[in-house]
């Protein structure tokens, strides 16, 4: 006699409990195995597979999520959420064109929604097509503010601000980044973004420093925030104070970040440590060869005293 099946009314509870055991035990890498076992246990119900896929996306298993979601949509193409989750999986897999294609299908079926517009904007941002990104983020904003609650959200404001900044519209970038911070005062990415933008522009430097300090208080060892603090201190005419932040940023970065090393070069040069400045800019050239960096390197090498 076979093992008795799980009653339908308890299946979701068993599934979620089983998955949570894997997650909370720190066994996220075993999640694909867990899902395959549960799938064998409960069958191929589209709603159940959709729940699996959401867990996969949240647990950073986008390839498995995409596989499940393609099965879901093949069985039930009317599950709207499945399109958004599949687009998220494709974005996590660095496949923005595939995500845009999925979202176009969703738009044809359900019309323009906040999900289709926001995620399409995000996909274009990954491609550095900020004109189209802004177009879709703006569409998402219109949908958000005309919905029942009539409100935008901090994440959308952040990406709108980012797109405006990339397109050189700094007043609008500031407006949306400020709004993102107003909506969520501990939004460290927005705090850092606005502070760094001001540092780059050479405006509101004391306010920029305060914003970056708030971001660092939330995430003190994040290389981009350390870099921002070093850069704003440099812009404030404090290269000696800037140097430890930039050195720590370079040390903690998982790869040679050309922006961090460019900033290091500028600080070393201002401190007349020309050999170290040249070394920093040589590091930049290994990953990002530009005429501007070559010019800086030549300037540093020219200042070096000839050795005897």
Image: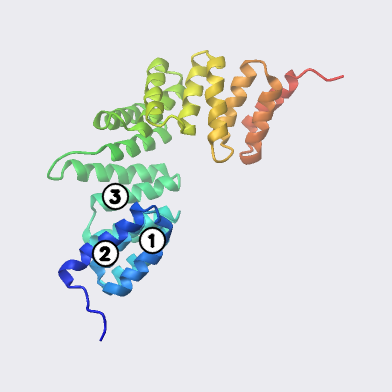
Query: Would you place residue 163 above or below residue 232 in this image?
Result: below
Residue at left offset 29%, top offset 60%? 83
The answer, for residue 82, to whether it is visible in the render is no
Of marks 1 and 2, which one's residue comes earlier in the chain?
A: 2
Which quadrant is the C terminus positioned in? top right
Residue at left offset 58%, top offset 35%? 258
Which quadrant is the N terminus positioned in? bottom left
The answer, for residue 196, to whether it is visible in the render is yes
Q: CA distance from mark 2 to mark 3?
A: 32 Å
Looking at the picture, how far across and down is residue 260, in whole percent?
55, 31
Of marks 3 and 1, which one's residue comes earlier in the chain?
A: 1
Looking at the picture, how far across and down is residue 145, in whole percent?
18, 40
Would you name the residue on which mark 2 appears? Answer: 15
Would you name the residue on which mark 3 appears? Answer: 117
Q: CA distance from mark 1 to mark 2?
A: 12 Å
Q: How is the image coloured?
A: rainbow
Asked if labels 1 and 3 touch by Cβ distance under 8 angstroms, the answer is no
Looking at the picture, how far across and down is residue 165, in whole percent?
40, 32
Looking at the picture, how far across and down is residue 273, in whole percent?
68, 18
Asked if labels 2 and 1 touch by Cβ distance under 8 angstroms, the answer is no
Query: Would you place residue 268 above or below residue 169 in this image?
Result: above
Would you name the residue on which mark 1 appears? Answer: 31
- Pick out the residue farthest to the top: 237
Image disc number at residue 192: none
């Amino acid at each position: 006699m076979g093992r008795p099946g799980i009653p339908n009314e308890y299946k979701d509870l068993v599934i979620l409990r089983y998955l949570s055991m894997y997650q909370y035990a720190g066994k996220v890498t075993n999640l694909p195995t867990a899902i395959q076992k549960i799938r064998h246990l409960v069958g191929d119900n589209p709603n159940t597979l959709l729940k699996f896929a959401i867990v996969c996306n949240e647990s950073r298993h986008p390839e498995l999520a995409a596989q499940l979601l393609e099965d879901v949509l093949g069985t039930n193409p009317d599950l709207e959420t499945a399109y958004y989750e599949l687009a998220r999986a494709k974005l996590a897999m660095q496949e923005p064109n595939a995500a845009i294609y999925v979202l176009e299908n969703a738009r044809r079926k359900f019309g323009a929604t906040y999900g289709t517009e926001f995620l399409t904007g995000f996909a274009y941002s990954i491609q550095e097509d900020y004109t189209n990104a802004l177009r879709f983020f703006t569409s998402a904003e219109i949908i958000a503010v005309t919905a029942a609650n009539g409100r935008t959200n901090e994440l959308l404001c952040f990406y709108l601000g980012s797109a405006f900044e990339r397109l050189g519209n700094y007043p609008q970038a500031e407006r949306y980044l400020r709004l993102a911070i107003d909506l969520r005062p501990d939004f460290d990415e927005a705090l850092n973004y606005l502070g760094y933008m001001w540092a780059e522009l050479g405006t509101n430097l004391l306010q920029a420093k305060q914003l970056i300090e708030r971001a660092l208080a939330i995430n003190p060892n994040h290389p981009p925030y350390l870099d921002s603090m070093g850069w704003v201190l440099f812009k404030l005419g404090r290269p000696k104070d800037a140097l430890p932040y930039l050195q720590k940023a370079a040390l903690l970065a998982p790869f040679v970040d050309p922006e961090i090393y460019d900033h290091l070069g500028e600080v070393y040069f201002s401190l007349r440590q020309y050999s170290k400045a040249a070394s920093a800019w040589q590091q930049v050239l290994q990953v990002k060869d530009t005429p501007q960096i070559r010019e800086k390197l030549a300037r540093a090498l020219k200042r070096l005293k000839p050795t005897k």
